[in-house]
């Protein structure tokens, strides 16, 4: 059973100002040492960018069905392989030996051998059924690299299947419900740490983020089981004394903050604004470049088109005035971030955002 889930949230005050609590919160479940509702509550405004989930289980899962180890070369569609159930550190060590003794030390006929080629056409010089070898550059007899298997643990946010960073997500079989002095609640275990990947369509430096203004739910493959071969479920409120069936995960959901302005170089009512300087507007998540056409500017009541909207940074929109002398002097302008502006998951700004200001002389 999932006992708790911890993640980051964003808080917006009555004036619309955003703040981020220092610690993650229990978005699902709680703990005897929780002292206030601020530490444990359903999350309706999860932080969009650079968030991760710590999914704390009530008992150990079978790690062989969650993570795989790195091999010296391709073994199937990639260079990672599942560790067979029953394989021991000694099996990893005998498949980590030098290439010339690998066939005799790590024969494919042994059901506990790892990093065995499964391709009909072979894996380079290694035929199908032969050992490719465990990646062990430091020669300590253990695998140098592990990663989470594709599609074993995931996030569904609305209609979006969120891409998962398999290299930075992991299964941590250590820990319990005792809160250590170092790490606090974020050291509770055993736990799966789930990290999203940046979405497709981003530019260099695009951070990982969750689809804005969507309701999200965990997904688990039926292959992820505990030592008794039971699948994962989420009991009501994380109360492990209550029943849930394998695959029943709907008791835990959270909502991501909307796509909104988190910082702006101009505010409503500003006066004396530079006629030629650029204006930077930062959003809570990276916008899709093609959606910036939904940003409009008015000079008084008239549409103003002598500007460009670009992305100097993935989350930052820059408005540049392209007229020969910039904006008109002592004139009121209104910038509108329209609902056609979307994040890279095609999730839109829910309501238009306006900034009205007056230029200087």
Image (cartoon, grey):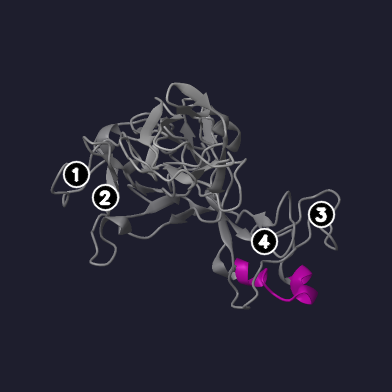
Dot 3: element: loop
- Magenta part of the chain: 91-104
The picture quadrant where one finds residue 73 is: bottom right
Label 3 and label 1: CA atoms lie apart by: 56 Å
* Mark 3–mark 2 distance (CA, rounded to whole Å): 53 Å
Residue on which the image places disc 1: 38
Instruction: Return the residue at label 2.
Output: 21
Which residue shows up at 31% across the image and 33% down it? 44
* Residue under numbered circle 3: 128
Along the line of sight, which residue is nearer the eye, 55 or 162? 162
Is residue 264 among the parts visible in the rendering?
A: yes
Q: Where 40 falls versus 158 (above or below)?
A: below
Crowd around label 3: few <14 · some 14–19 · many ≥20 (10 Å): some
Q: Foreground residue, 7 or 80? A: 7
Is the Cβ of the residue at disc 2 closer than 8 Å to that at disc 4? no
Which one is in front in this view, the residue at disc 4 or the one at disc 3? 3
Q: Residues within 10 Å of mark 1 (few under 14, many from 20)?
A: few
Q: Which residue is mark 4?
A: 113
């Amino acid at each position: 059973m999932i006992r708790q889930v911890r993640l980051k949230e964003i808080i917006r005050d009555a004036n619309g100002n955003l703040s981020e609590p220092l610690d993650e919160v229990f978005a699902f479940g709680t703990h005897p040492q929780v002292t206030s509702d601020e530490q444990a509550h359903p999350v309706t405004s999860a932080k969009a960018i650079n968030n991760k989930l710590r999914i704390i289980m009530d008992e150990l899962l079978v790690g062989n069905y969650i993570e795989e180890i790195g091999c010296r070369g391709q073994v199937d569609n990639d260079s990672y392989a599942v560790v067979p159930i029953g394989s021991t550190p000694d099996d990893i060590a005998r498949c980590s030996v030098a290439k010339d003794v690998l066939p005799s030390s790590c024969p494919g006929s042994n059901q506990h051998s790892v990093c065995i080629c499964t391709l009909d056409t072979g894996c380079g010089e290694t035929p199908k059924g032969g050992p490719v070898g465990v990646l062990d550059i430091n020669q300590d007899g253990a695998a140098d690299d592990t990663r989470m298997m594709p599609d074993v643990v995931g996030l569904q946010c609305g209609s979006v299947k969120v891409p998962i960073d398999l290299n930075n997500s992991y299964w941590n079989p250590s820990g319990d419900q005792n809160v250590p002095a170092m790490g606090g609640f974020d050291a509770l275990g055993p736990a799966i740490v789930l990290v999203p990947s940046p979405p497709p369509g981003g530019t260099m430096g695009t951070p990982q983020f969750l689809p804005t203004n969507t309701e999200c739910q965990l997904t688990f493959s039926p292959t992820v089981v505990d030592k008794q071969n039971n699948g994962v479920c989420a009991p009501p409120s994380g109360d492990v004394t209550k029943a849930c069936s394998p695959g029943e995960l709907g008791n835990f959901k959270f909502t991501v903050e909307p796509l909104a302005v988190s910082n702006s170089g101009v505010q409503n009512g500003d006066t004396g604004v530079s006629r030629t300087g650029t204006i930077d507007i930062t959003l809570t998540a990276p916008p899709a470049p093609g959606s910036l056409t939904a940003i409009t500017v008015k000079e008084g009541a008239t549409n103003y088109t002598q500007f460009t909207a670009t992305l100097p940074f993935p989350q930052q929109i820059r408005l540049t005035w392209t007229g020969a002398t910039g904006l008109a002097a002592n004139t009121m302008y209104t910038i509108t971030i329209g609902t056609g502006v979307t994040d890279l998951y095609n999730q839109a700004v829910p309501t238009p955002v306006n900034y009205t200001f007056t230029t200087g002389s």
